[in-house]
Amino acid sequence: MAGITSGVVLLLLAISGFFLNHDNWKFIYTTTVSNHYLPEETIKLGSKLYNSYLIDTEQNNIQLLSGFRGVFRSNDSGKNYRQILDIPSYTLVDFNAVYYLATTEGMYISKDKGLHWESFALKGEVVTALSVDNKGILAVVDKAELVLLQFDGSVLDRSSVKIEKKELIHDISLGRLVRDVHYGRGLFDDGLSLLLNDFSTLWLILLASTGYVLWYLIQRIRKKKQYKKPLSFLLKIHTSSWVLVSVIPLILLALTGILLDHSQFFGKFLHQTTVPHKVLPPIYRTLKEDIWSVDLHDGVYRIGNRYGVYKSDDMKQWHLESKGFAYKMMHDDKRVFVSGMGAANRVYSENRWKTLENTPHMFKSINGEGESRTYFSSSSDMRLAKLKDTTLYTILLSIHDGSFFASWWVFVNDFVSVLLLILLYTGLRLWYKRIRVKFGYR
């Protein structure tokens, strides 16, 4: 009965989690549903899909929004927007009145204030971050490779980031580890963490689906209906030893999911509890696929990952310069700005780092100078494009966190997560008994 009760919610969590793990798939942003059919809380989540907000320095009435729904342009200070490009994008940079865009299909460029865009470099590759300076263009491909380009789009250098082990000996908070594990980036390198998450969620979908069908067939058999052949086949799938591979990842997903559902309640505990480096999973010993942000400024290269900001003069030797997850980086003539994720925002000025006070958490872009400087984040009150539909990604996100249904739905998620742990335990016991009988042990 526990399986029957939790099956639907587990299916929703597994399916939504699988697609959310692959946020660079274009169709989850181009597939939309009219807002008329959606709850208000889901519609509001759409603002999280914007990654850059740019105000033209010469004509303030021209504004651009870019993000996973593409590029939107306004000629009337944000009152009305028109979609110019439908390719999911990560970062928009204005350099000398030329706009550079990092997208899931390479780099794009606009020389007419965002009115027209054309493919520029790294065609077909997922460019997750970029920075532009007089020295050239520094881009990141799929959070794993650094590419240095000239202004004609030709590649000067391309390499993976290899940080020496001594530069990676750092403890982290339990909260950071919980998030990394749940989002498929907290165990192993080379995409294995995400692969384990995918395998586990797909197997959970299969277990829940076959479980429902088996339950139905058993009910029919009790009524003397003949369904024994398909029942035998489905039982083999449902009790396959392959499920053992997914047990530990599913336990981790359930436990971390419960903690994240109540991050405010557990926040202090998660933040103050330190996990020593020596017990961290293997991925924390390389972080070679963890380049979240990048900056090229005055001939100095910087990358941002979950440990902090690393600096290099040659893209080969990297040294930690500022601790704390560097979510985004950007610069002006004299300063480098860092937006933190679960860490303080900060700025590098006059040869030292200092905290950037009174700025929104995880801001994504900056406009203006001095007192008139504005920081754009998902919670900003800046004028955004008013869209009549919502993406499949946003809907899946609101289903996964429960806001699609009600504010109290997180407790339903908690309930089925606990039931999943119970089902995994009882399933393992049944499997163990079956193996003992098969090999003649009693």
Image: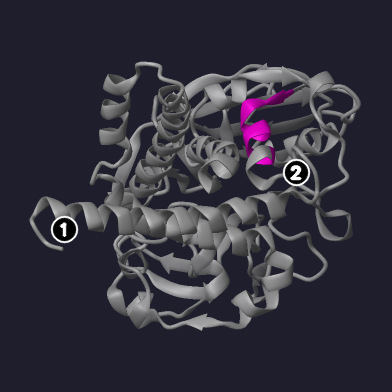
Mark 1: amino acid: Arg
State the image coordinates of residue 430 (x, y, percent, origin top left). Answer: 31, 54
Q: Does the image show residue 22?
A: yes
In the depicted view, which residue is nearer to us: 302 or 167? 167
In the depicted view, which residue is nearer to us: 28 or 252? 252
Q: Does the image show residue 54?
A: no
Mark 2: amino acid: Ser
In the depicted view, which residue is nearer to us: 14 or 230? 230
Residue 302 — which label? none
Mark 1 sits on what residue?
Answer: 436
Q: Are marks 1 and 2 in contact (CB under 8 Å)?
A: no
Where residue 76 sits, quadrant-wise, is: top right
Q: Is residue 285 above or below residue 429?
A: below
The majority secondary structure of the magenta stretch comes to: helix
> Would residue 409 be found to the left or right of residue 209 on screen?
right
Q: Could you tell which of marks 1 and 2 lies nearer the N-terminus?
A: 2
